[in-house]
Amino acid sequence: MATSTTSLKKVSGFFGFFRWAFMPLGLFALVAVGVHAAADLLDDQVLRLVESVDAWLDGILAQSESLGAWVNRIDSRERTLIARAVALAWELAVDGFVALPLLGYDEQSDEERRFAFRKETWRALLSRLNQRPTPMRLVRPFVTAVFVVGGAYAVSRLVESSLFVGLVGDVAPADVAQALARVLGGLAMALVLFSHGWRAVLRGLEHADARCEEAAKTSKVKPWLVGVWGSALAIPLAVALLLEARSLLSFVM
């Protein structure tokens, strides 16, 4: 028994050595999955916007005889490709603004790893947020939290569907497999939120605080302008996820 316990400790210590690498990567991946889920929700809206712009340009070109030949040069296939490219560029931009800074997450000591919430860090950050509120300090943790929940939900759906396919039929009847898969999917979501969710929000607030403090010291840019482009791009995606979550809750309840 003692030998097995020692072996488990060695294995745990071995994987713990790489925590500095897989924890930031996990935070980045979690938020990136949430951003991707939000971008998928806006595909149709982006396509309608592209179609509106195309119709507006066709109306302008049609008024000129020399440019009339260019009317309707862009058909439905091209419009779909343009909409997908815009949605992809939007998603990658938000990943760069919101998810990429999470790679800078660092746990300073074993003491911080032992507790789920670092009270002193939260207190200092929230104190500066209260004293010197800026758009980036307010928006960045909010959108990060929304994307974290969206990413965790996507993970839970993947776990649920995979388990259902594996259990139904030979292992368990459909109703039992569905119930068990749903419970384990919810457990997976809870574990992801507990192990990674709060860390991602904390890192988002830390990054926003550091950027605003640096701007205040150097005076190169006003603190309330820091991160304005990232916030402007991230808020619509976060709102889309919130609206989707609201519709899902109303359907379930």
Image (cartoon, rainbow, N blue to C red):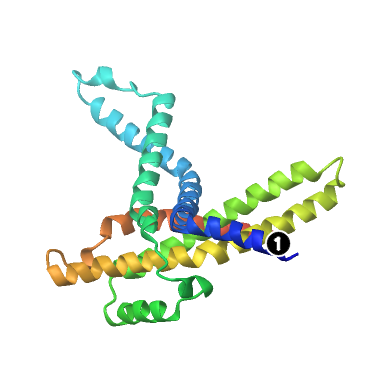
Up the image or down, 224 lies above or below 172; here it is: below
Q: Position of residue 132 (x, y in %)?
A: 26, 78
Q: Nearer the viewer, residue 240 or 182?
A: 182
Q: Nearer the viewer, residue 220 or 241?
A: 220
Mark 1 is surrounded, within 10 Å at the Cα level, by few (under 14), some (14 to 19) or many (20 or more) other residues, namely few
Q: Position of residue 13 (x, y in %)?
A: 55, 60
Picture residue at 59% right of the left edge, 51% below the top: 155
Q: Quadrant of residue 52?
A: top left
Q: Provide the residue designation for mark 1.
A: 3
Lateral position of residue 67 relative to residue 118, left or right: left
Q: Secondary structure at mark 1?
A: helix
Q: Nearer the viewer, residue 64 or 158?
A: 158
What's under tag 1, amino acid-wise? Thr
**Quadrant (top left/top right/bottom left/bottom right) for the N terminus:** bottom right
Q: Position of residue 236 (x, y in %)?
A: 40, 55
Picture residue at 51% right of the left edge, 63% below the top: 197
Q: Position of residue 115 (x, y in %)?
A: 52, 75
Q: Quadrant of residue 136?
A: bottom left
Q: Residue furthest front?
A: 3
